[in-house]
């Protein structure tokens, strides 16, 4: 019994730019076919075979090997073939070129139209799509509790600011350094020389580099994200806020696993 082929897997495009590049690529293939004038191009012109290969390769690259589009066009041809028993005259082969050109053009135009329809799915409200992506994030509870409602309601600047404040408060609570704030808090609590909270064993240069690097990330969260929003009313976009809040959540998760270090005696 012949083995059934795997089910078709339609291509899932992630961005509008990806679709734009695919349309441009197929557009170039279409232009190559349109250059073939059946009045002056013979059926055995070497350009024809090259274009056929280019079209097949482009469809494979764009849609993938198991896509319905590639399965349908993996034998894409311009000069129509058939099961021939005996000799086929030059006249017949030329007729197949003349008949095949409109079909080849129509096939590519149909693929381009399909991509354009997919592209239209990306032209909706960006904020709506980003809010959907936000709902799928696995945010740290400290960050989600203060930012989720604000983000859903479109208050992006406030969502980022409150997430920053929640992160700072989390550092204060875990380090018990309520006497410090901002960058000074982060530099003291996460210093590689005598940290209050450590992200690793601090046993070798690699550990110390990681400790210092994370210290700078926490410091940057305060200086680049919290402070500007605490002192100005510049708005955030939905996409920017999504990325900032995901970053702050990542820091909160790192903080969750940090361990208090015994105080060094003078």
Image (cartoon, rainbow, N blue to C red):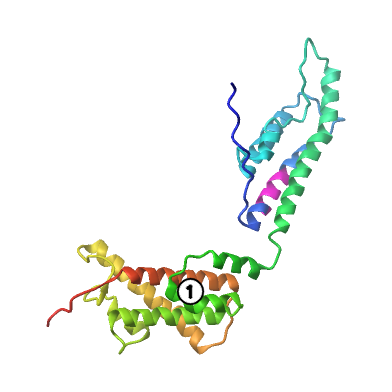
Q: Quadrant of the C terminus?
A: bottom left
Q: Is residue 61 left or right of residue 179?
A: right
Q: Residue furthest front?
A: 1
Measuring 34% from the left and 72% from the top, which residue is drawn there? 255
Q: Residue at x 38, y 82 (%)?
A: 169
Q: Nearer the viewer, residue 11 or 48?
A: 11
Q: Nearer the viewer, residue 98 or 106?
A: 106
Q: Main secondary structure of the magenta part?
A: helix
Where in the figure is residue 154, as x and y percent of width and height?
61, 77
Using the image, determine if residue 186 lies above or below residue 15: below
Q: Which residues are magenta?
A: 20-28
Task: Pinpoint residue 112: horizontal percent, then vertical percent.
Answer: 74, 47
Residue 195 percent across, percent down from the top left = 24, 76
Per the image, label 1 sits on a secondary structure element best described as: helix
> Residue 92 in magenta?
no
Residue 192 horizontal/vertical position (percent):
25, 72
Is residue 34 something one can see in this rendering?
no
């Amino acid at each position: 019994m012949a083995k059934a082929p795997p089910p078709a897997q339609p291509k899932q495009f992630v961005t509008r730019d990806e679709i734009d590049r695919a349309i441009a690529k197929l557009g170039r293939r279409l232009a190559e076919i349109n250059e073939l004038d059946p009045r002056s191009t013979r059926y055995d012109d070497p350009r024809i075979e090259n274009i056929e290969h280019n079209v097949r390769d482009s469809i494979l690259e764009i849609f993938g090997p198991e896509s319905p589009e590639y399965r349908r066009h993996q034998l894409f041809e311009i000069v129509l073939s058939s099961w021939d028993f005996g000799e086929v005259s030059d006249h017949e082969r030329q007729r197949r070129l003349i008949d095949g050109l409109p079909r080849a053009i129509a096939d590519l135009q149909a693929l381009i139209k399909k991509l354009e329809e997919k592209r239209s799915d990306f032209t909706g409200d960006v904020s709506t799509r980003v809010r959907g992506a936000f709902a799928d994030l696995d945010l740290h509870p400290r960050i989600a509790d203060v930012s989720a409602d604000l983000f859903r309601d479109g208050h992006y600047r406030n969502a980022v600011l409150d997430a920053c404040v929640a992160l700072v408060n989390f550092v204060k609570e875990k380090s018990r350094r309520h006497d410090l704030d901002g960058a000074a808090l982060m530099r003291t609590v996460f210093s590689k020389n005598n940290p209050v909270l450590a992200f690793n064993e601090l046993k070798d240069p690699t550990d110390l580099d990681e400790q210092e690097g994370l210290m700078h990330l926490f410091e940057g969260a305060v200086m680049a994200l919290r402070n500007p929003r605490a002192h100005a009313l510049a708005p955030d976009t939905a996409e920017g806020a999504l990325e900032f809040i995901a970053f702050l959540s990542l820091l909160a998760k790192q903080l969750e696993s940090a361990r208090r270090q015994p105080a060094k005696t003078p």
